[in-house]
Amino acid sequence: DAGITQSPRHKVTETGTPVTLRCHQTENHRYMYWYRQDPGHGLRLIHYSYGVKDTDKGEVSDGYSVSRSKTEDFLLTLESATSSQTSVYFCAISGIIVGASPYEQYFGPGTRLTVT
Amino acid sequence: QKEVEQDPGPLSVPEGAIVSLNCTYSNSAFQYFMWYRQYSRKGPELLMYTYSSGNKEDGRFTAQVDKSSKYISLFIRDSQPSDSATYLCAIHQGAQKLVFGQGTRLTINP
């Protein structure tokens, strides 16, 4: 366990409602990421952050926004959830770890989101 | 063409067999190559990584990179039922980002 928690772990919501997922880390790592995982597509990057208030888009960012006001928290918001956003969402962190590659990412346990 | 291609399987082998998992990639500039293991309904966990070409061994696991062929492999010796999982290759794409293969689902049968 890399000191990453995600909340909620499961959520069912209706189409058109806003949803916010939270990622919390205790490791003080600079980089944080949001991925979605779907059958046939593997892990795809949604957004990532390289510091407080510094974020950038990933491969599948449409329909998602993020915010990072503190080092330890990275929020993913679905402004108006759609059925195509039904997925498993993973948060990851990376940073400078002694003895490790700086590019290694460590993942949280995931949030299973269903949009009906 | 996807940047990283991985056969999704599923792959099913008997206990004790040698398993070979593979990925191909398109960008010859990639330098860091990683393998993650993901158990059902869990987050991916880093198994091992290699830098540039060559082999790296960790217990029953060996990661191999062939940059001339743009081909990376993970070998599992003396496979155990506890190795049953999805294995994902990942490659550092630049700007602290990784690009992942689709994942190969592996089952080791007792």
Image: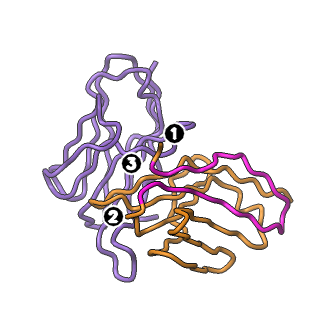
Residue A41 pos. (x, y %): 51, 39
Is the residue under label 2 in contact with that under label 3 (CB below 8 Å)? Answer: no
Q: Which mark is residue A6?
A: 3
Distance in Å between CA atoms under marks 1 and 2: 22 Å
Q: Which chain is orange?
A: B
User: Nearer the viewer's eye, disc 1 or disc 2?
Assistant: 1
Is the residue under label 2 in contact with that under label 1 (CB below 8 Å)? Answer: no
User: Nearer the viewer's eye, disc 1 or disc 3?
Assistant: 1
Residue A50 pos. (x, y %): 21, 57
How many C-alpha atoms fall within 10 Å of the one at disc 3: few (<14), some, or many (≥20)?
Answer: many
How many C-alpha atoms fall within 10 Å of the one at disc 1: few (<14), some, or many (≥20)?
Answer: few
The structure residue drawn at horizontal position 58% and vertical position 57%, both measured from the top left corner, is B23
Dot 2 corresponds to which residue?
A94
From the viewer's perspective, tell me whether residue B90 is left or right of residue A20. right
From the viewer's perspective, tell me whether residue B55 is left or right of residue A90. right
Distance in Å between CA atoms under marks 3 and 2: 16 Å
The verdict on a common chain for dots 1 and 2 is yes
The amino acid beneath tag 2 is: Ser
The structure residue drawn at horizontal position 47% and vertical position 52%, both measured from the top left corner, is B100
Magenta span has A16? no
Q: Say if A97 sits above or below A71 in the image.
A: below
B63 or B41: nearer the viewer: B63
Is the residue under label 3 in contact with that under label 1 (CB below 8 Å)? Answer: no
The amino acid beneath tag 3 is: Gln
The amino acid beneath tag 1 is: His
Dot 1 corresponds to which residue?
A41
Label 2 residue SS = strand
- Please report, as a chain letter, where disc 3 is located: A
